[in-house]
Image (tube, rainbow, N blue to C red):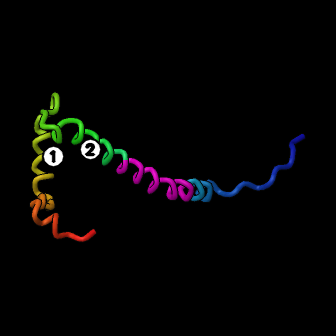
Amino acid sequence: MQRWSPPRPPTSALNLLALGKWCSVIPIVLAMLVIMVLAGVVVLYVAFPHRGEEMPHTPWVGDAMRKGVNMLPTLDNQREDDREHQDF
């Protein structure tokens, strides 16, 4: 004798439900991936080109990082007589 079971939704509805669950996870995974890559780039820059050393096995990456950093605007060091006149 066969047991009674509740009716199952069509398979297309199940696929949509599963897709809806994944759609909320994908942006979080992508954001975390971007964060990890950016953190890795910062660590590589601080470990090698910032200290004036060449990166092992990929010197072109260090050159590209140096060029990118040199393009960014920076503040120049102030002269000592300018520091005496500043009020903090």
* Upstream in sequence: badge 1 or badge 2: 2
- Residue position marked by numbered label 1 in the rendering: 65
Measured as percent of width and height from the top left, residue 18 is found at 57, 53
Q: Nearer the viewer, residue 56 or 19?
A: 56
Helix, strand or loop under label 1: helix
- Magenta range: 19-35
Question: Disc 1 marks which amino acid?
Answer: Met
Measured as percent of width and height from the top left, residue 78 is found at 12, 61
- Above/below status of 43 relative to 86: above
- Residue position marked by numbered label 2 in the rendering: 41
Measured as percent of width and height from the top left, residue 71 is found at 11, 57
Q: Is residue 62 left or right of residue 41?
A: left
Looking at the figure, which quarter contains the C terminus?
bottom left
Q: Nearer the viewer, residue 32 or 80?
A: 80
Looking at the figure, which quarter contains the N terminus?
top right
Q: Are marks 1 and 2 in contact (CB under 8 Å)?
A: yes
Measured as percent of width and height from the top left, residue 43 is found at 28, 40
Question: Disc 2 marks which amino acid?
Answer: Val
The residue positioned 11% from the left and 34% from the top of the image is 59
